[in-house]
Amino acid sequence: MKEEWLERICQRLQGRALLEEEVKWALRSWENELKKLEDKEMDDLLGLLVASGKVQCTASLEAISKEGEEPFFSFFAWMKRMLRFGKENAKLTYHCNRCGADEKDIHLVYCHRCRGECAYCRRCLVMGRSSCCVLYYLFPCNRRKVKQNIHAEAALYSYPQLTEAQCAAARSALEFYEGPSDEKQEFLVWAVCGAGKTEVMFPLLRYLLENGRSVLWATPRRDVVLELAPRLQRAFPDYALAVLHGNTPPQEKWNADQLVLATTHQALRFYRRFDVVIMDEVDAYPYTSDDMLPFAVNRARTLSGKTVYLTATPRPDYQKRMQKPTNHKDFLPHVKIPVRYHGHPLPEPVICRESKLNNRLRTRKPIHTLLSFIENSEKRGRPVFIFVPAIRQLPILYDYILAHNENWKTKAATVHASDPEREAKVMALREGRLQALLTTTIMERGVTLSGIQVLVCQADAPVFDEAALVQIAGRAGRSASVPDGQIIFMAEEVTGAMKAAIRQIKKMNRLARELGYISYT
């Protein structure tokens, strides 16, 4: 009976990287029999798995001597060290085995479990406490190989609705995956905003799922996970989809099906499990600012697996890699989708200079660009996004607009990342109950509204870098019914980021015309 339990535990947790507390939560959420076990009995089962070599176990946070002594993996070794805690401890350095953090993210505190000084990792604390006295389990993934049930061309032809540009990109992704595993393991899809990059991945997904491969679709933002989940469920109804994010119900948190859609933070709980990782919005916050997240996503992939990056605004380091010779070791294979699904060119922003913007907003002096933009939008009945660099500027802009036109009192609202009514306000804009949202950069991604008009107030602020401005401009003209849209960068000075964003948009339009993808002029 015990052997049967050990096999079931390995099967249910394969490809997982979990703290000891998480292992127990996961097992007890699945098996009624395990709910009855005491912690000691659960520890004995896990100890047998480690002793048999089926599971790896270390301390979640490792103490290493700076003088070349062996690492301290176990709780017991760490406790012995604690008995001698003092000057000798200055010779230790620390490493978090869960997130890869080093000294700067490690803190020493009094630990009630150790009853003494203990180190813990602050970088991955949001996912649970990793410390020297907490065990960390790595469950290898031992899936059986499945014979090929579908060929790449058949998967591609399953989606005749793809446009010519989308089909070319989908074919490139399939060819990349079928290439030798000892060559390039990364591939980037550079798709303009509104190009339908999600649908471009469907042929590759079908090919992988029907041939028994496992896939992680990861993205930095929870709202993107929530938006993608129903689309993937409709597209692949025959396959169970695990949806993992910070608010996933406890009974679903430990699900790990063949197809997993998750925030990048959740990738921290996987270990060498997925044959392919689709990293959506690879340029988005917080993925670009937290080294833990690329570490987690890369470790979730099998050693021979591959990663596909999706983005409308590749980071500069990716763009440099794309420009290298194809035989260079750092070359990043890629494909561009320079046109939206409806075949119209991207709306191109215009720059409008206005002096002393801060002062004129506060004193409510006329700003021609802003007032004419508001007036034209009101006449045409078009929805409006007005972006500002910081939350504190939202009420100033709102009061300015009302001072010049009281009609907007019931038609405009402010929104930012911590606004509890954010989703309700976006819905009100969709349904026409609001006409304008004054917003921070929180609305630069993931929102599609037909006919939207866009103005960036103080576009010369540092927060509006090239990528942010391209994404903001990408809100306009996304629907086939209204493929155009006004985009204004209003600023005191013209920045390099503003020029670069416009240059990138024009370059994509030019490439789309050269490839014959533009159906309309």
Image (cartoon, grey):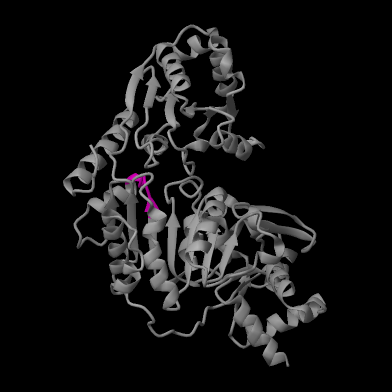
**34 w.r.t. 171: above or below:** below
Front position in the image: 231 or 189? 231
Q: Which residues are magenta?
A: 310-316
Residue at 57%, 29% (x, y): give it.
434
- Residue 332 appears in the rendering: no
Q: How far across and down, in percent of the image, does residue 224 sit?
A: 52, 50
- 464 with respect to 497 (left or right): right
Front residue of 480/298: it is 480
Task: Please indicate whether residue 76 sits to the left or right of residue 339 in the image.
Answer: right
Q: How many callouts does the rendering have?
A: 0
Q: Position of residue 311 (x, y in %)?
A: 38, 50
Q: Residue at x 23, y 45 (%)?
A: 512
Q: Is residue 315 magenta?
A: yes
Q: Position of residue 271 (x, y in %)?
A: 53, 70
Quarter residue 46 falls in = bottom right
Q: Residue at x 73, y 78 (%)?
A: 31
Name above or below for residue 514 compared with residue 309.
Answer: above
456 to the left or right of 32: left
Check the image and report above or below for 132 versus 146: above
Going 43% across and 29% down the picture, which residue do you hit? 453
